[in-house]
Image (cartoon, rainbow, N blue to C red):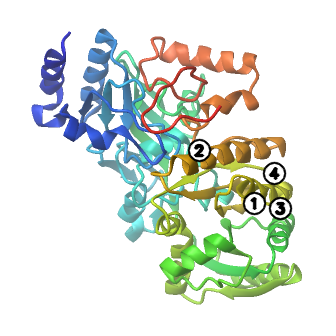
Amino acid sequence: MDKKSLIDELAQIVGVENVFHEPEDLITYQYDAYLSRAMPDFVVFPTTTEQVSKILKVASREKVPFVARGAGTGISGGAIPVKGGIVVALSRMNKILEIDFESRRARVQPGVINLDLSHAMKDKGFHYIPDPASQQSCTIGGNVAENAGGPHCLAYGVTTNHVLGLTVVLPNGEIIHTGGKALDYPGYDLTGLLVGSEGTLGIVTEIIVRIEHRPEAVKTLLASFSSMLDAAKTVSAIIASGTIPAALEMMDKPAIEAVEAFAHAGYPVEAAAVLLIELEGLKDGMDRLAKKIVEICQSHKAIEVKVAQNEQERMQLWKGRKCAAGAIGRICNKYYLHDCVVPRNKLVAVLSEIYQIAEKYQVQVANVFHAGDGNLHPLVPMDMSDRDQVERALRAGDEILKCCIQAGGTLSGEHGIGLEKNELMPLIFNEADLTAMKKVKAVFNPEDLCNPGKIFPTPGRCLEVTQRPR
């Protein structure tokens, strides 16, 4: 089928105004928050599961590759159309279809913004727990694709722990339903398989999630330290005490300085590290629990421990954490944000090595991360117009990931593999492991039309801006 005929057929499904095919319209959809770019041939905007099904039937028949896209906030290149084809933009599938307070469930379309779901339930005292730093703009569909986390997932788990059912359009256009409102269903856990599959097995068009009562009491603390070692030891001591905070975040000095200059959140710029600690639970006993955490911090050489005295102070402390990536963005035109996981007892050793790697490649690095579960997020600022600097940043990134793996960690905690790390997958999986995963993918996506080129090593990849160094 020629291009014009394909445009006409797609327009019959979603309307002519919902099919983009001119270069000036497509350019926005050639990238996400990663570094690479690749231009699609078409962008379509469905509003229903049935429309997605019809689009994929056309793509399957014509052997046209396609990729689902939410808000484009992904950091591993998951929404980049590396083989052109169709971008199925789900941003207009943004309805909250049902909120069932009695069952503590909500049913949403994939284009619903993460934070909007919590705002819709605020007056009833409920919220949706997974809270990525980009929750003001990222979509729940994207969170499902990457199995996103967030600060409060230390105590409550990542996206997969809050998704109970899915409606999915398979690459051939067939519609399936997995899970549902109940706690468990017989048979294979297809919901668990699909969450975190990075859009390579099908396109999710409806999601059933858990919703929870907001906690009765919340205490937020900011502890500052003169060394990263003392801060890291405090993290281990808090967990070892039997208390699992709702959130336990750490920033190093470069991140603190950038955040404070931007957000004026009250972070001490003279500190080598800060811990942002949030406790949730019943009002009775919360003050005693906060006192216990203060004492642990003080016994591990905290310079100061602030306890937010009201909601305004609490939100100000969180503003600093949530805007960290944006604050770094003020000092450069791009940054490379990593996502790797190490055991908590290896935090100090790995962070020390990260600083050495940055020095070796003559790049800056700022660390802001989920310390409680060892999920590191080193940020490497760079100038995209300086090709040498970009190459050094990428090489430093590879070495950072390798040092995390050598410390007993893994490649990703919440951002996914995508394009960013697919060539590094053999560092943690052997050939038999990768073959088994590819066989699962082939059952759902036998012709590799659905988000091709992601997760698994792909030789000979050619992209416009950057390639992963080899």
| Residue drawn at the location 83% of the way across and 42% of the way down | 406
> Which of the 4 image quadrants contains residue 281?
bottom right
| Residue drawn at the location 33% of the way across and 32% of the way down | 39
Of labels 2 and 3, the one closer to you = 2
Q: Estimate the spatial distance between the alpha carbons at disc 4 and disc 3, rounded to whole Å.
A: 10 Å
Q: Is residue 48 above or below residue 99?
A: above
Image disc number at residue 391 = 2
Mark 2: secondary structure: helix
Q: Estimate the spatial distance between the alpha carbons at disc 2 and disc 1, rounded to whole Å.
A: 18 Å
The tag earlier along the polypeptide, 2 or 1, is 1
The residue identified by callout 4 is 343
| Residue drawn at the location 57% of the way across and 51% of the way down | 389
Inspect this view and state whether residue 429 appears.
Answer: yes
Are the residues tagged 1 and 3 within 8 Å (C-beta)? Answer: no
The tag earlier along the polypeptide, 1 or 4, is 4
Q: Amino acid at mark 3?
A: Val
The residue identified by callout 1 is 355
Of labels 1 and 3, the one closer to you = 1
Left or right relative to 42: residue 165: right
Of labels 1 and 4, the one closer to you = 1
Mark 1: secondary structure: helix
Q: Amino acid at mark 1?
A: Tyr
The residue identified by callout 3 is 348
Q: Amino acid at mark 2?
A: Glu
Left or right relative to 292: residue 96: left
